[in-house]
């Protein structure tokens, strides 16, 4: 896979007797890697996988025999890990957070159903769903995972590869315009909200 704007790298790569086909993306350790470093591909992939997991458990989620606590446990242990696999490395924009939250609330509304209020049925509010679930919303869950991973990387030895990549400064000239949101920008924003200094 080539990365960047250089159009001379569109041919296959030959090393000795081996020829490697050029690809635009590939899956590595369950995570989609693409040439433009576009996070939407990974979020879409995880949403699709989580939706498959949900469809496989739909009979259990709809069942009137299984308690809500058991259904919530099914969501937390079987669906949410699929949805957030690799979330430590995601660059979360507001759009991605919104899409993840919509998916999560769809499942929670199926689990907790409607409520009778003053003689009329009504859909539960978002805050009600999260209070009943007893967990943070999915965006906060992803951000906490990212902070946990950042703390792990920053505590590594100076010669550790992940720490060197985090602290390195890429060379070259940045193109004009607003720079793309980076992983480190998200970490620094979360740390500033928590009020930490010199993390």
Image: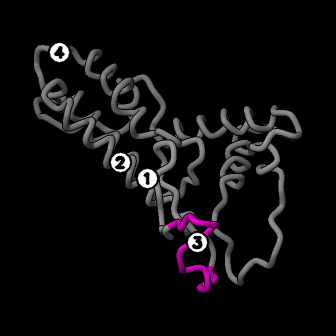
**Which residue is label 2 attached to?**
47
* Direction from residue 132 to residue 4 in the image, left or right: right
| Alpha-carbon span between mark 3 and mark 1 | 29 Å
Identify the magenta region. 5-20
- Residue 17 is covered by the magenta coloring: yes
Assess whether mark 1 and mark 3 are in contact (beta carbons under 8 angstroms). no
- Quick one: label 4, few (<14), some, or many (20+) residues within 10 Å? few
Assess whether mark 1 and mark 2 are in contact (beta carbons under 8 angstroms). yes
**Which residue is label 4 attached to?**
66
* Residue at x-position 11% and y-position 34%: 120
- Which is in the foreground here, disc 2 or disc 4? 2
Earlier residue among tags 2 and 4: 2
| Alpha-carbon span between mark 3 and mark 4 | 55 Å
**Which residue is label 3 attached to?**
13
Task: Assign a secondary structure to mark 3.
Answer: strand
- Residue 30 is covered by the magenta coloring: no
Earlier residue among tags 3 and 4: 3
Image mark for residue 43: 1
Q: Is residue 106 above or below residue 177?
A: above
Task: Assign a secondary structure to mark 2.
Answer: helix
Q: Quadrant of residue 195?
A: top right
* Residue at x-position 83% and y-position 61%: 169
């Amino acid at each position: 896979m080539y990365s960047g704007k250089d159009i001379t790298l569109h041919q296959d790569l030959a090393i000795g007797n081996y020829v490697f086909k050029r690809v635009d993306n590939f899956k590595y350790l369950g995570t989609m890697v693409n040439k433009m470093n576009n996070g939407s591909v990974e979020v879409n992939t995880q949403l699709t996988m989580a939706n498959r997991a949900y469809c496989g458990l739909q009979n259990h989620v709809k069942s009137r025999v299984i308690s809500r606590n058991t259904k919530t446990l099914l969501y937390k242990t079987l669906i949410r890990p699929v949805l957030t696999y690799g979330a430590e490395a995601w660059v979360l924009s507001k759009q991605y957070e919104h899409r993840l939250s919509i998916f999560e609330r769809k499942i929670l509304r199926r689990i907790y159903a409607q409520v009778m209020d003053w003689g009329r049925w009504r859909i539960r509010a978002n805050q009600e769903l999260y209070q009943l679930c007893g967990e943070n919303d999915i965006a906060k869950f992803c951000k906490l995972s990212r902070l946990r991973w950042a703390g792990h990387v920053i505590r590594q030895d100076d010669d550790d590869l992940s720490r060197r990549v985090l602290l390195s400064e890429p060379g070259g000239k940045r193109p004009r315009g607003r720079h793309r949101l980076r992983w480190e920008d998200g970490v620094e924003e979360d740390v500033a909200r928590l009020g930490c200094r010199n993390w």
